[in-house]
Image: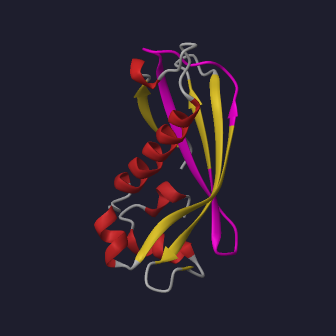
Amino acid sequence: MTEPFSVPVTVRGYETDVLGHLNQSVYLNYAEHARWSLLQAAGIGQNELIGKGVGPVALETTIRYLRELRAGDETVVTCVFSWGEGKTFRIEQQIRKPDGTVAAEITAVSGLMDLKERRLVRDPREYFRALAADARLFGL
């Protein structure tokens, strides 16, 4: 995959704070929206995850706010999965303005939890490969 997966999001007025900026917590919502959109594009819905007995979990999230976003701004939220050898994986995301300016960078450390054992699965890649109609969206 050459380009990162991305989804468009328009900043809505009710998402802004008293300064007129996108509220800090909404950046997480945009990132989460892009992640679930990637899963759906790959053919994985919540029912498929539950059917396999797993669910995604966020273990750590870091946001770098670089440029302000205001009501009506059009953005693109990118999403790239990065794999290591262990139980966790990273998700690198950017929220960009139409001119390419990066408004925020979001980095998350995540895993897949076995819903019965309540522990991270040993190799989340095998689950994504097995569930996905297009595992290339995950960089697999």
Q: Position of residue 15 (x, y in %)?
A: 45, 25
Q: Is residue 126 a member of the stretch shown in magenta?
A: no
Q: Quadrant of residue 82?
A: bottom right
Question: Looking at this view, is 6 or 119 the one in front?
Answer: 119
Horizontal placement of 48 versus 62: left or right?
Answer: left
Q: Quadrant of residue 25?
A: top right
Q: Residue furthest front?
A: 18
In the rendered image, the vertical position of residue 114 relative to residue 13, given as above or below: below
Colouring mode (rainbow / by chain / secondary structure / one colour): secondary structure
> Could you tell me how many numbered marks the image carries?
0
Q: Position of residue 128 (x, y in %)?
A: 47, 69
Horizontal placement of 121 versus 87: left or right?
Answer: left
- Magenta segment, which residues? 64-91
Q: Residue at x 64, y 68 (%)?
A: 88
Q: Residue furthest left?
A: 47
Q: Residue at x 54, y 15 (%)?
A: 18
Q: Residue at x 47, y 40 (%)?
A: 29
Q: Is residue 87 a member of the stretch shown in magenta?
A: yes
Question: Looking at this view, is 32 or 74 the one in front?
Answer: 32
Question: Looking at this view, is 90 or 18 the one in front?
Answer: 18
In the rendered image, the vertical position of residue 121 relative to residue 10, given as above or below: below
Q: Residue at x 37, y 70 (%)?
A: 49
Q: Position of residue 140 (x, y in %)?
A: 54, 64
In the rendered image, the vertical position of residue 38 relative to residue 86, given as above or below: above
